[in-house]
Image (cartoon, helix red, strand yellow):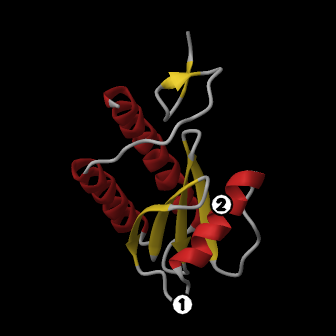
Protein backbone atom coordinates (compact mmCIF):
# COMPACT_ATOMS: atom_id res chain seq x y z
CA UNK A 1 0.00 0.00 0.00
CA UNK A 2 1.51 3.32 -1.11
CA UNK A 3 1.04 6.62 0.59
CA UNK A 4 1.20 10.31 -0.13
CA UNK A 5 4.66 11.64 0.62
CA UNK A 6 4.63 14.23 3.36
CA UNK A 7 1.28 13.18 4.83
CA UNK A 8 1.71 9.72 6.34
CA UNK A 9 -1.69 8.70 4.95
CA UNK A 10 -2.81 6.25 2.25
CA UNK A 11 -3.01 7.39 -1.38
CA UNK A 12 -6.83 7.29 -1.53
CA UNK A 13 -7.45 9.53 1.50
CA UNK A 14 -7.55 13.32 1.68
CA UNK A 15 -4.53 14.94 3.35
CA UNK A 16 -5.21 15.99 6.92
CA UNK A 17 -3.79 18.87 8.86
CA UNK A 18 -0.88 18.04 11.09
CA UNK A 19 -0.48 19.03 14.71
CA UNK A 20 2.87 20.68 15.34
CA UNK A 21 4.56 20.82 18.73
CA UNK A 22 7.25 23.36 19.61
CA UNK A 23 9.93 20.74 18.95
CA UNK A 24 8.54 20.30 15.41
CA UNK A 25 8.56 24.05 14.78
CA UNK A 26 12.16 24.23 16.04
CA UNK A 27 13.21 21.48 13.60
CA UNK A 28 11.41 23.19 10.70
CA UNK A 29 12.97 26.55 11.58
CA UNK A 30 16.47 25.03 11.68
CA UNK A 31 15.95 23.44 8.25
CA UNK A 32 14.72 26.76 6.80
CA UNK A 33 17.63 28.65 8.37
CA UNK A 34 20.16 26.28 6.78
CA UNK A 35 18.35 26.71 3.45
CA UNK A 36 18.80 30.49 3.70
CA UNK A 37 22.49 30.10 4.49
CA UNK A 38 23.11 27.66 1.63
CA UNK A 39 21.24 29.62 -1.02
CA UNK A 40 21.83 33.19 0.19
CA UNK A 41 18.11 33.72 -0.42
CA UNK A 42 16.47 36.66 1.33
CA UNK A 43 13.48 34.87 2.87
CA UNK A 44 11.57 31.61 2.97
CA UNK A 45 7.96 30.74 3.82
CA UNK A 46 6.28 27.44 4.54
CA UNK A 47 2.56 27.74 3.81
CA UNK A 48 -0.37 25.35 4.17
CA UNK A 49 -2.45 24.95 0.99
CA UNK A 50 -5.39 26.64 2.73
CA UNK A 51 -3.29 29.76 3.36
CA UNK A 52 -2.00 29.65 6.94
CA UNK A 53 1.68 30.48 7.36
CA UNK A 54 3.42 27.58 9.12
CA UNK A 55 6.92 29.04 9.36
CA UNK A 56 9.11 31.81 7.99
CA UNK A 57 12.76 32.73 8.09
CA UNK A 58 14.78 35.62 6.77
CA UNK A 59 13.89 39.05 5.46
CA UNK A 60 10.83 39.41 3.26
CA UNK A 61 11.64 43.03 2.48
CA UNK A 62 8.64 45.12 1.48
CA UNK A 63 6.41 42.06 1.17
CA UNK A 64 3.89 41.15 3.86
CA UNK A 65 3.54 37.57 5.04
CA UNK A 66 -0.20 37.73 4.30
CA UNK A 67 0.43 38.84 0.73
CA UNK A 68 3.09 36.22 0.12
CA UNK A 69 1.00 33.51 1.80
CA UNK A 70 -1.85 34.35 -0.55
CA UNK A 71 0.50 34.19 -3.52
CA UNK A 72 1.86 30.83 -2.38
CA UNK A 73 -1.68 29.50 -1.89
CA UNK A 74 -2.61 30.58 -5.42
CA UNK A 75 0.54 28.99 -6.82
CA UNK A 76 -0.20 25.80 -4.90
CA UNK A 77 -3.63 25.63 -6.52
CA UNK A 78 -2.24 26.15 -10.01
CA UNK A 79 1.00 24.17 -9.40
CA UNK A 80 3.01 26.69 -11.37
CA UNK A 81 4.77 29.79 -10.08
CA UNK A 82 3.46 33.19 -11.12
CA UNK A 83 5.68 35.56 -13.04
CA UNK A 84 7.49 38.08 -10.89
CA UNK A 85 10.32 40.57 -11.24
CA UNK A 86 11.91 39.20 -8.10
CA UNK A 87 12.98 35.60 -7.83
CA UNK A 88 10.38 33.40 -6.18
CA UNK A 89 10.77 29.62 -6.24
CA UNK A 90 8.08 27.16 -5.14
CA UNK A 91 8.59 23.55 -4.03
CA UNK A 92 5.63 21.42 -2.95
CA UNK A 93 6.12 19.70 0.39
CA UNK A 94 3.79 16.72 0.52
CA UNK A 95 0.12 17.14 -0.29
CA UNK A 96 -0.73 20.17 1.87
CA UNK A 97 2.26 22.46 2.05
CA UNK A 98 4.30 24.71 -0.23
CA UNK A 99 7.82 26.02 0.35
CA UNK A 100 8.36 29.49 -1.13
CA UNK A 101 11.85 30.95 -1.43
CA UNK A 102 12.27 34.66 -2.12
CA UNK A 103 15.65 35.61 -3.56
CA UNK A 104 17.50 38.42 -5.31
CA UNK A 105 20.61 38.80 -7.44
CA UNK A 106 22.87 37.66 -4.59
CA UNK A 107 22.17 34.04 -5.57
CA UNK A 108 21.24 32.01 -8.63
CA UNK A 109 17.97 30.40 -9.62
CA UNK A 110 19.73 27.05 -10.04
CA UNK A 111 21.11 27.09 -6.51
CA UNK A 112 17.71 28.01 -5.07
CA UNK A 113 16.00 25.23 -7.04
CA UNK A 114 18.48 22.54 -6.04
CA UNK A 115 18.51 23.39 -2.33
CA UNK A 116 14.79 24.16 -2.31
CA UNK A 117 13.89 20.76 -3.71
CA UNK A 118 16.25 19.03 -1.26
CA UNK A 119 14.71 20.89 1.68
CA UNK A 120 11.19 20.12 0.45
CA UNK A 121 12.03 16.41 0.48
CA UNK A 122 13.55 16.69 3.98
CA UNK A 123 10.47 18.54 5.26
CA UNK A 124 8.18 15.92 3.67
CA UNK A 125 10.03 13.23 5.66
CA UNK A 126 9.64 15.29 8.84
CA UNK A 127 5.90 15.70 8.13
CA UNK A 128 5.60 11.92 7.67
CA UNK A 129 7.12 11.45 11.13
CA UNK A 130 4.69 13.99 12.61
CA UNK A 131 1.72 12.32 10.90
CA UNK A 132 2.68 8.90 12.25
CA UNK A 133 2.89 10.36 15.75
CA UNK A 134 -0.56 11.98 15.51
Left or right: where 117 falls relative to 21? right
Mark seen at residue 73: 2
Query: Residue 31, percent across and down?
Result: 33, 54
Query: Mark 1 or mark 2, which is nearer to you?
Result: 2
Quarter containing the N terminus: top right
Mark 2: few, some, or many residues within 10 Å (few <14, many ≥20)?
many
Query: Which residue lies at the image location 59% right of the left edge and 61% below the top edge?
Result: 51
Closer-to-camera residue (36/6) = 6
Mark seen at residue 62: 1
Residue 125 versus residue 42 in the image, above or below: above
Q: Secondary structure at mark 1?
A: loop
Closer-to-camera residue (19/68) = 19
Query: Residue 23, percent across and down?
Result: 22, 49
Mark with earlier residue (1, 2): 1
Query: Residue 66, percent across and down?
Result: 56, 75
Quarter containing the C terminus: top left
Left or right: where 73 falls relative to 132? right
Residue 36 versus residue 12 in the image, above or below: below
Residue 104 versus residue 45 in the image, above or below: below
Left or right: where 71 falls relative to 97? right
Mark seen at residue 14: none
Amino acid sequence: MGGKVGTGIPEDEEPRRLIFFQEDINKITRVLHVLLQNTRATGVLLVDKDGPLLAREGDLGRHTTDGLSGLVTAAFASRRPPESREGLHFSPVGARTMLAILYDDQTTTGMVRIYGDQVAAKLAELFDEIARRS
